[in-house]
Amino acid sequence: MIEFPNAKINLGLNVTRKSEDGFHEIESVFYPVNWRDSLEISPREDKTLNFKAEGMERLPNFESNDLVTKDEFLASGDPEEGPTPPNLVEKAYALMQKHYDIPGADIILKKDIPMGAGLGGGSSDAAFTLKMVNKLYDLNLSNEKLEEHAATLGSDCPFFIQNRPMYVTGKGEKMQPLDLKLNGFYMVLVYPGFHVSTKWAYSKIVPKPVEADMLMVIKQDFPQWKKHLKNDFQPLVIKERDYLLRVIELLNNNGSMYTAMTGSGSTVYGIFSEFPEGIQFHPEDTHVTLPL
């Protein structure tokens, strides 16, 4: 079975408070976009799980390196030292083996969505693994049960079970479906070649009260989005890497109606009314243009 896990963006991201257990509570709208990986699962006759990933750098210690480029990380030491930590796909399949009587599998993950980019690619891969296992072995699990399993793998994972626009609160586990459609528009996503550690970003963020009703703002037009729909992490990352501001200005100057960073970074997206042409991206930036 082959599926194509997709990315997501954040339309606004407010960090509202830090709870007693140390986790941060957020408010955001998650919106799926068609930047995709490829995931193939082939059942085996035994219980062995063989996992292979293609198209992804081996960066097991990225979380301790704050804001780093790939080259900076590779120059900091031998990336081949130490064992490779399990991928979220491996964890997801092993979780299903633990709870259900299913065989092993040969799994091939082909990465196209950048890692550590605020796009939720790893979370999507894990959630799609759960859904594929459910189909392959006729487990007949409900979305609610799959979301319960997904929540044990990561805070963004449950979103990709239903994979539709959601108003997300709490630690990311409270989701309200939204009738939000951006059909007819185009999106340009730009990954500027550096990773933002989620751990670092949350260690630097200062929670603050919400200034505007996000559900009301999201129903309005793009000028209101520009005025009220903010990502609390964006100024934090720009302070450390002002190149991100130049990416934002590039999209704005080429007709983007709404431009923002997604997640805790570092990908920036712009929404356009027509297919954008002639944008001069930096050669090292990874960019895609997608219909919405």
Image (cartoon, rainbow, N blue to C red):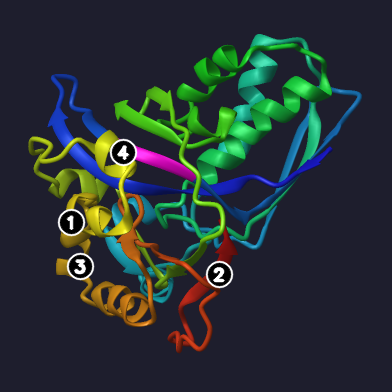
Q: Amino acid at mark 1?
A: Lys
- Compared across the picture, whether 171 is left or right of 78 comes to left
Q: CA distance from mark 3 to mark 4?
A: 20 Å
Range of magenta residues = 27-31
As measured in the structure, the alpha-carbon distance from the residue carrying label 3 to the one carrying label 1 is 18 Å
Rendering coords of residue 119 (x, y %)? 46, 51
What residue did someone put label 1 on? 227
Q: Secondary structure at mark 1?
A: helix
Q: Label 4: few (<14), some or many (≥20) within 10 Å?
A: many
| Alpha carbon separation for disc pair 4 and 1 | 16 Å
Front of the two marks 3 and 1? 1
Mark drawn on residue 288: 2
User: Which residue is tagged 3?
Assistant: 238
Please, is residue 199 above or below residue 16 in the view?
below
Sequence-first tag of 4 and 1: 4
The residue positioned 47% from the left and 46% from the top of the image is 120
How far, Cα to Cα, is label 2 from label 4?
A: 23 Å
Question: Which marked residue is nearer to the observer: mark 3 or mark 4?
Answer: 4
**Which residue corresponds to the image point at 49% horizontal and 51% vertical from the top-left?**
182
Quadrant showing the C terminus: bottom right
Disc 2 vs disc 1: which is toward the camera? 1
* Amino acid carrying mark 3 in the image: Ile
The three-letter code of the residue at mark 2 reads Val
Residues tagged 3 and 4 counted as in contact (Cβ below 8 A): no
